[in-house]
Image (cartoon, grey):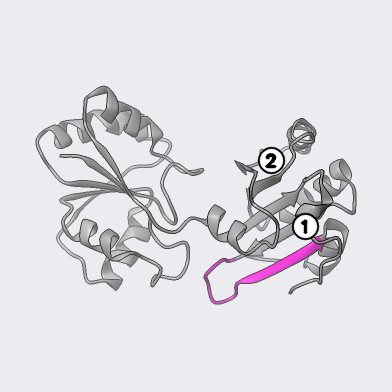
Amino acid sequence: MPLYVLATPIGNLADITLRALDTLKNSEIILCEDTRQTIKLLNHYQISNKKLLSFYAQNEKTKIPEVIKNLKENKAISLVVDSGTPCISDPGYHLINACYENNIEVFSIPGPSAVTSAISICGFSADTFLFYGFLPRKDGKIKKILHSLKDIDGLIVFYESPFRVKNTLNLIKEVYGEDVKVFLARELTKKFEEKFIGKVVEILEKISDKIKGEFVIIVNLYKNKNNTKENFPIIE
């Protein structure tokens, strides 16, 4: 049997495809980054009697032989993460490589992703973008990475936590200048979704030190200013 790499909602449980639901219903085993999160989704859609196997970054390599064995025994298996698409700043790629090495097919069940969701509403041209994922925690390492990306002629996309988002924006200001254009999305598709767009210095003035939620940061490093409007309204 093939492995199904299945995207799940990033916040709003209604954002799941019919094909994804059908695949989950027909799966014997579901590999979960966190079984507690997956159970919420399964319960919402009244999907039951599934074996949930904990499968996250720290145990992925040790679980692979068991998963490969089950796939070779023709068991229907889906891989999901807590939210969004597996392997995008989430575990899964070691398993996928192991499947290819064992001549096991891998199918994508596409759906939500915070990266593409944020890019689609950022207001910047997305002809060229680089997705970096989560930055390291130490300021020195963050600045080194930001400097290494300075010559990119396009967008840079980061994920960030509520505990570090303001500090990261300050470092973006320090490295790229206070006039660099930024799109900041908080809690995409959830009840308290919020967006900010404008110069990084303006956004820093708008957000609270105690801001909560999951964030996507998009930095506009296009060299040709025709790729974006020069002046943005601040959206909040």
Extent of the magenta region? 187-198
**Residue 82 appears in which quarter of the rendering?**
bottom left
Give coordinates of residue 172: x percent, y percent.
81, 46
* Between discs 1 and 2, the one toward the N terminus: 2
Residue position for label 2: 137
**Residue 175 appears in which quarter of the rendering?**
top right
Q: Residue 174 or 209: which is nearer the viewer?
A: 174
Give coordinates of residue 232: x percent, y percent.
82, 67
Give the Cα distance between marks 1 and 2: 30 Å
Q: Residue 210 or 13: which is nearer the viewer?
A: 13
The kind of residue tagged 2 is: Arg
Give coordinates of residue 205: x percent, y percent.
86, 66
Asked whether, in this view, residue 98 is left or right of residue 187, the answer is left
What label does residue 228 carry, if any?
1
Q: Is residue 55 above or below residue 117?
A: above
The kind of residue tagged 1 is: Thr
